[in-house]
């Protein structure tokens, strides 16, 4: 019976076929299909039996599944199997199979087969499609698994390749770094060679082939194309160096001996270079190899350094300044020659190890400064007795010297602590002594200036006093002459005259002390003058004192006033026997000539006297008395100083005055308890005074007359002289100074016969006035009057000389004699 | 009111984006899928065509988070409107507003969505939902098929074009068969076809509720 097919049902089956692909598993597909198939016309129940599932999907409603699939599985692996349910009635089983495999069965329990049969093709198609989908899914699964496996393999392989690639990259990197390092090292080596001017060489014994590095080509000044055979290499050495290097190379080859030589080569460009070559033998590899360096600069530097060292060593050794080096502990490490001389040390080894900080002559304060790293500069007295007492070192020096020390701490890099000490030492003993001497001289000079000032004042007073006495004596003389015979006042005037003369004598002694005596000097035999007065002096000496003499005559000649020399001798002898006292003793007198160099400098008077001549006559008077205390020696020549009860204190003062006036000196040497020695030194003379006119006193007894021009600034003296010359018969034109005198002389030149001029005057002195007058009248006779010594006055160069000299104070007779002498000596 | 003239009285066809043909607005479709690639290919086109057509579009996300949906759509070149025209909502919150799935509530939500689109003069409205939320054991979720059947009646008066997404990997085969029965149209191999399993809502419901 043909039934009409339901298109909707067909559509549902077809749609189901279209939807099968969305179900991810057989089970899900079964869940979807079972209700669909169950609703098919004629069907009672449906089930799907899948090979991979333990139980079918769906329920056949009473039909018991015989588990054929399980059995089949147990029997053998097979792609095809039959469903046993089909053996029952109304059960249809459609295999879900492809040409490859069977996946199960679609089973329907049919209640109306006819009704169902119309849809069977669609169901069979559904089963086929499902089988294809399952196969497709399985294949996809297998494909997926295969793909996963492949991907895993690819991944693994990729990782392996990546690892290998990474290792390769690292290897390449390492290799590159190694190559770069090698290149850097090569560059560094070349730069090092260039900077150090050093190269390497190798000589293959077997082949005779020699290899040089670049720098050796450069040192030899050859191109890199140069073939450095051994012969050529040796050929660069100088004649002196060549045999040395040849022998060294030979011994290295034959005996394996290394060598280390400093030689000279001449480069290809002809430059002489010092080289240092070192060679070592490598017997196993049959080669010698080594090092070659241009040491020309180093040699030059060493030579310069050596010269510099020598120079500085010479400076160090020859330096007049003592130099010491101490280490950081203050232990002496070296000292130069000057230093050894200063400290009286024979060899530097004698003081090596001397501790600076143990130096007893270094104060604690200075040591503290040094420890603070401060520069110390100081002057100290250095006492060798302390060195001996502490047994610091052996020295030939004694006493105390003065040192100027400069101690410089040598700082370390931190500038905080000393790494040693540099000491500069100068022996300033002489300077110190000179300074002390200079100080003494300055003291003496001040004393001298003071004495000279006092002397000038005393001299001025003595001269004024002399002038006044001259007025007194002159007027007294004229008054006595004018007195009538037996006048009662005669004795009074005579007494006054005696007192005035005594006063003039004291005044003269004063001038003598001041060296301003006016006594005339002549060439005398000094020993002879002494001998002449010896008997008188012996007579006045006590009998207990013996006088020994050494007066060989003729002795040295001097220009002196004999009476003054006698005065000197008398004072010295008197002083000597008074020094001996009442006990026994002796005095020794001698006269001799000595060199100026032998004149003692100690206790020499006047202070500051220096010899002007080469030879001096010496009167030496020594006694065996008590001697003079050191502190008194400087005072014994002071006026009115006396250690004796009876003395006036003028004796030695007068001696000094006379000696000073004679441009001589007197020295005193005395040892308390042993006696004293006085030595008077006077310049010796070989000739007579040429300029001094010896007055030839052949004056006539007749009186002279005429006009005299009198020039005197002292009014009283001028008046007295006017009176005296008027008495002598002259007409006097008086002028108070040279200017006024010249004026008078111009006007009355024809009547003026003679000029009497004082020497010391304001405006124009006597010499200037004399010169001016001689210009007006070259022949005019002139008398110069002065309280000073004639010899002193006449000494020196004068264009005009007077006809006569008149000493002040003068009497009528000496005035008359001078006038007569002047007129007599008129040109 | 006929659903074809719901918005403007004229026949209202709309493009689904992944087929050449246009379909009437209010078409209720199911997408049964097992491949995510397949799902995205269909849904991406569906949403894009709605946005491009100026429709009000809503998407109920469950397997993806809403923000992930936006990022995915942007990544395939879809310009997403910044305003209410396009919204991505959490499916669970949308379907189960108070922690329970009540079909009537969701049907009202669907109506409201359509009314709002209408008021805002959108030419059409469309939605798509990931239905996997129904597998989480949420109270009322067993009434999903009841809801799906009733939707067909609602869409007659409120023609919102809809695609319900069912993952064949997650839903059982029997459930899938029920899904087919409540959707008049289904997407198979990227094509929209009439569903031969479809049953009228009343038939389905009477049969469905009488199941043991």
Image (cartoon, rainbow, N blue to C red):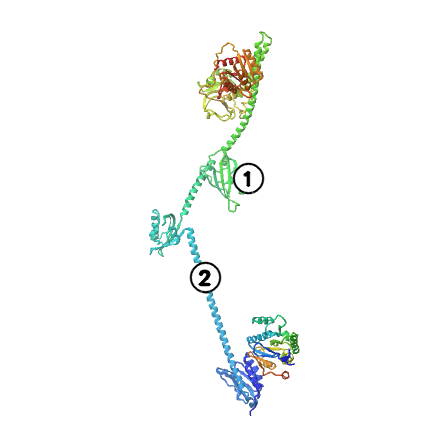
- The disc label shown at residue B175, or none: none
Seen at 55% across and 11% down, the residue is A727
SS class, disc 2: helix
Residue furthest to the top: A485
Can you see residue A573?
Answer: no
Relative vertical location of residue A342 with respect to residue A536 in this rendering, above or below: below
Q: Mark 2 and mark 1 in contact (Cβ < 8 Å)?
A: no
Q: Are marks 1 and 2 on the same chain?
A: yes
Q: Residues within 10 Å of mark 1 (few under 14, many from 20)?
A: few
Looking at this view, name the residue that lies furthest to the front: A747
In the image: residue A801, left or right of residue A278: right
Image quadrant in which you'd find residue A812: top right
The spot of residue A571 in percent (x, y) is: 52, 19
Q: Chain of mark 2?
A: A
Q: Which residue is mark 1?
A: A365
Label 1 vs label 2, nearer the camera: 2
Crowd band around label 2 with a 10 angstrom C-alpha radius: few (<14), some (14–19), many (20+): few
Picture coordinates of residue A620, whole percent (x, y): 48, 21
Which SS class for mark 1?
helix
Q: Is residue B157 left or right of residue A232?
A: right
Whether residue A170 is visible: yes
Q: Specify which label sits upstream in the sequence, 1 or 2.
A: 2
Relative to the observer, which residue lies in front, B68 or A332? B68
* Image coords of residue A700 (percent x, y): 49, 10
Look at mark 2 in the image and give the residue it sits on: A174
Where is residue A763? Give x, y as percent: 55, 21
Q: Residue at x 47, y 65 (%)?
A: A166
Check the residue under mark 1 and report the chain it is in.
A
Determine the CA span between mark 1 and mark 2: 69 Å
Up/down of A521 relative to A319, above or below: above
- Of A746 and A514, the residue lying toward us: A746
Q: Is residue A158 above or below residue A420?
A: below
């Amino acid at each position: 019976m043909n039934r009409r097919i339901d298109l909707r049902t067909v559509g549902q089956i077809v749609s189901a076929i279209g939807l099968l692909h969305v179900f991810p598993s057989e089970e899900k597909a079964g869940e979807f299909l079972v209700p669909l198939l169950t609703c098919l016309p004629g069907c009672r129940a449906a089930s799907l039996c899948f090979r991979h599932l333990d139980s079918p999907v769906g329920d056949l409603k009473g039909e018991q599944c015989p588990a054929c699939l399980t059995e089949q599985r147990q029997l053998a692996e097979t792609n095809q199997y039959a469903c046993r349910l089909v053996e029952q009635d109304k059960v249809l089983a459609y295999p879900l199979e492809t040409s490859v495999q069977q996946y199960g069965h679609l089973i329907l329990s049919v209640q109306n087969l006819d009704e169902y049969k119309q849809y069977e093709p669609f169901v069979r198609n559904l089963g086929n499609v499902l089988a294809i989908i399952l196969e497709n899914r399985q294949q996809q699964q297998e494909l997926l698994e295969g793909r996963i496996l492949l991907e895993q393999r690819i991944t693994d392989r990729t990782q392996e390749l990546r690892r290998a690639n990474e290792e390769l990259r690292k290897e390449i990197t390492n290799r590159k770094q190694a190559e770069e390092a090698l290149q850097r090292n090569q560059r560094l080596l070349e730069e090092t060679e260039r900077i150090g001017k050093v190269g390497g060489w190798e000589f293959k014994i077997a082949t005779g082939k020699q290899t040089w590095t670049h720098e050796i080509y450069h040192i030899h000044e050859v191109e890199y194309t140069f073939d450095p055979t051994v012969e050529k290499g040796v050929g660069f050495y100088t004649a002196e160096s060549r045999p040395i290097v040849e022998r060294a190379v030979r011994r290295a080859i034959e005996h394996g001996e290394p060598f280390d030589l400093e030689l000279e080569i001449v480069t290809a460009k002809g430059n002489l270079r010092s080289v240092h070559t070192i060679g070592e033998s490598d017997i196993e590899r049959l080669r010698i190899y080594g090092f070659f360096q241009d040491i020309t600069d180093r040699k030059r530097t060493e030579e310069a350094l050596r010269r510099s060292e020598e120079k500085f060593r010479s400076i160090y050794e020859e330096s007049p300044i003592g130099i010491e080096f101490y280490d950081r502990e203050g232990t002496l490490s070296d000292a130069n020659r000057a230093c050894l001389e200063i400290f009286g040390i024979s060899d530097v080894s004698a003081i090596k190890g001397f501790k600076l900080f143990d130096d007893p002559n270094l104060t604690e304060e200075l040591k503290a400064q040094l420890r603070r790293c401060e520069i110390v500069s100081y002057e100290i007295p250095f006492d060798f007795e302390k060195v001996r007492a502490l047994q610091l070192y052996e020295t030939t020096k004694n006493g105390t010297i003065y040192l100027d020390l400069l101690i410089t701490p040598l700082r370390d890099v931190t500038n905080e602590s000393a790494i040693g000490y540099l000491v500069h030492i100068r022996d300033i003993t002489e300077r110190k002594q000179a300074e002390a001497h200079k100080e003494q001289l300055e003291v003496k000079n001040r004393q001298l200036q003071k004495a000279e000032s006092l002397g000038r004042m005393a001299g001025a007073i003595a001269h004024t006093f002399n002038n006044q006495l001259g007025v007194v004596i002159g007027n007294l003389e004229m008054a006595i002459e004018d007195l009538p015979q037996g006048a009662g006042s005669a004795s009074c005037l005579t007494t006054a005259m005696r007192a005035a003369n005594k006063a003039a004598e004291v005044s003269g002694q004063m001038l003598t002390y001041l060296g301003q005596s006016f006594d005339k000097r002549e060439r005398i035999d000094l020993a002879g003058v002494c001998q002449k007065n010896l008997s008188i002096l012996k007579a006045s000496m006590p009998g207990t004192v013996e006088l020994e003499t050494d007066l060989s005559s003729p002795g040295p000649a001097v220009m002196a006033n004999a009476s003054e020399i006698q005065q000197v001798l008398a004072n010295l002898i008197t002083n000597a026997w008074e020094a001996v006292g009442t006990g026994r003793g002796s005095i020794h007198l001698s006269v001799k000539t000595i060199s100026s160099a032998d004149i003692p400098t100690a206790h020499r008077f006047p202070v500051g006297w220096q010899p002007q001549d080469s030879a001096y006559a010496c009167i030496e008077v020594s006694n065996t008395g008590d001697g003079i205390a050191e502190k008194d020696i400087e005072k014994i020549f002071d006026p009115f100083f006396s250690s004796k009860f009876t003395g006036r204190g003028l004796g030695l003062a007068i001696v000094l005055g006379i000696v000073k006036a004679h441009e001589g000196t007197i020295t005193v040497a005395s040892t308390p308890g042993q006696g004293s020695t006085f030595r008077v030194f006077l310049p010796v003379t070989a000739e007579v005074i040429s300029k001094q006119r010896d007055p030839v006193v052949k004056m006539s007894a007749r009186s002279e007359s005429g006009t005299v021009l009198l020039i005197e600034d002292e009014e009283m003296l001028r008046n007295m002289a006017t009176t005296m010359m008027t008495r002598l018969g002259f007409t006097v034109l008086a002028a108070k100074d040279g200017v006024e005198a010249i004026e008078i002389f111009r006007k009355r030149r024809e009547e003026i016969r003679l000029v009497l001029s004082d020497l010391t005057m304001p405006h124009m002195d006597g010499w200037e006035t004399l010169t001016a007058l001689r210009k007006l009248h070259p022949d005019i006779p002139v008398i110069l009057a002065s309280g000073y010594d004639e010899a002193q006055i006449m000494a020196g160069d004068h264009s005009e000389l007077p006809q006569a000299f008149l000493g002040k104070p003068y009497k009528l007779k000496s005035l008359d004699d001078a006038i007569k002498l002047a007129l007599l000596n008129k040109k | 009111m006929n659903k074809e003239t719901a918005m403007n009285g004229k026949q209202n066809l709309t493009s689904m984006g992944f087929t050449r043909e246009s379909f009437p607005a209010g078409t209720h479709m199911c997408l049964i899928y097992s491949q995510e690639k397949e799902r995205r290919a269909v849904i991406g086109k569906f949403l894009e065509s709605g946005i491009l057509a100026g429709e009000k579009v809503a998407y109920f996300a469950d397997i993806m988070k809403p923000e992930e949906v936006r990022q995915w759509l942007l990544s395939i070149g879809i310009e997403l409107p910044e305003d209410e025209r396009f919204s991505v909502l959490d499916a669970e919150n949308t379907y189960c507003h108070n922690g329970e799935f009540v079909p009537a509530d969701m049907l009202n939500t669907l109506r409201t969505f359509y009314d709002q689109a209408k008021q805002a003069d959108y030419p059409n409205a469309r939605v798509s939902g990931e239905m996997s939320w129904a597998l989480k054991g949420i109270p009322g979720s067993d009434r999903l098929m009841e809801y799906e059947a009733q939707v067909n009646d609602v869409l007659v008066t409120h023609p919102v074009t809809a695609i319900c997404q069912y993952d064949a990997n997650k839903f059982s085969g029997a459930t899938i068969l029920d899904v087919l029965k409540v959707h008049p149209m289904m997407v198979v191999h990227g094509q929209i076809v009439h569903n031969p399993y479809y049953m009228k809502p009343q038939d389905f419901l009477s049969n469905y509720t009488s199941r043991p």
